[in-house]
Amino acid sequence: MHEHSHGHHHDDRDHDHEGSELSPMALRVRALESILVEKGYVDPAALDVLIDTYETKIGPRNGARVVAKAWVDEEYRALLRTDATAAIHSLGFTGRQGEHMVAVENTAEEHNLVVCTLCSCYPWPVLGLPPVWYKSAPYRSRAVIDPRGVLADFGITLPAATRIRVWDSTAETRYLVIPMRPAGTEGWDEEALARLVTRDSMIGTGLARTPEEGRA
Amino acid sequence: MSAADTLLDAVCSITPVARDADGPVFREPWEAEAFAMAVALNEAGLFTWSEWAEALSQEIRRAQAAGDPDLGDSYYHHWLAALERLVAEKGVAAPEALAERCAAWDRAARATPHGRPILLENDPLAPA
């Protein structure tokens, strides 16, 4: 093609200063969106609001507040164990993918790990959108067949006596892990405790930070 | 070591789970737009969330069968494919209509000076 380009200045594709380019994925999204807008199925302004909400307003800080409250408030903890959906809604965290929540509590005897083997169902209202690794095939398959190995990838080694229980999410049911409250936090208020609760600790691929780690 | 253990070891040594910090939710704008369209169409009642999860998991399996290592970075590719299929199945937009519109956007982009907003009207073949 190159040796001919001198004779075809007007459609020389090597020179992009004339036009713009969209990636194949961006083209497909624009195609779909423009048709949906024309047919009245979606409103571009509403899409922007949705994106902004999930990018900036919903995230694992919501879940951390739930966990911290459960650590200090026995009554709330009981409600969370029996009706997690209601307990989470009572803090104002509602919305899609949180319609039926189940909270599972870590103890010295049992550690809980959450996965979605089929796709990537995830409790958006309390954790935001899932991290890349949660959506990956290695995590989705290995969490079930080798949970201890997965925890090792995350730098977590549990005592051999601790059982690991794996919860497979579905379109209907989402799980939130209540990590164990770290030692040395007696008398701490909810806000200080919430800072020790990481996203991974609520999926089960991590533990809550210790007071020393929280200071770092 | 049993045969099952050997197999397990083999599977696990190949594909460690990649960890991350709290990275950005979307890596490119189109991912965010595809995400929001699925949520909006579910809200509009075009499909239930169970239908959505089923379509998405089918697309993931299909991509894996076609050789996608499926490390999570191609997740929104699967997402968009599921969305296009559901939209076609529900009779909202046929694959041919989507392909035609894709081509129109591509022509519009190429006809738009760099740095200017790309509008569908910029397609030189658009009806006047």
Image (spheres, coloured by chain):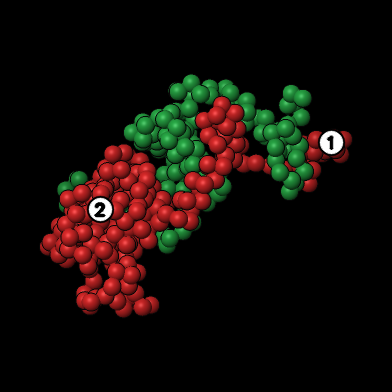
Pinpoint residue B117: horizontal percent, then vertical percent: 71, 44
- The earlier-in-sequence mark between 1 and 2 is 1
Front of the two marks 1 and 2: 2
**Residue occupying the point 74% across, 26% down:** B125
Secondary structure under tag 1 reads: helix
Q: Nearer the viewer, residue A190 or B24?
A: A190
- Give the left or right position of residue B35, taking residue A152 as reference: right
Pinpoint residue A190: horizontal percent, then vertical percent: 29, 69
**Residue occupying the point 35% across, 52% down:** A93
| Quadrant of the snapshot with the C terminus of chain A | bottom left
> Image height check: is A81 above or below A212?
above
Pinpoint residue B24: horizontal percent, then vertical percent: 49, 56
- Give the left or right position of residue B78, taking residue A184 as reference: right
**Subunit that carries the residue with mark 2:** A
- Quickly name the residue at label 2: A87
Q: Nearer the viewer, residue A208 or A59?
A: A59
Secondary structure under tag 2 reads: helix
Q: Nearer the viewer, residue B66 or A190?
A: A190
> Image height check: is B72 above or below B47?
below
Image chain in red: A
Check if mark 1's residue and mark 2's residue have beta carbons within 8 Å.
Answer: no
Do tags 1 and 2 sit on the same chain? yes
Q: Residue furthest right?
A: A7
Image chain in green: B
- Assess disc 1: are there few (<14), some (14-19) or many (≥20) residues with their C-alpha within 10 Å of its C-alpha: few
The answer to whether residue B17 shows anywhere in this view is: no
Which numbered circle lies on residue A10? 1
| Amino acid type of the residue that numbered disc 2 sits on in the rendered structure | Ala
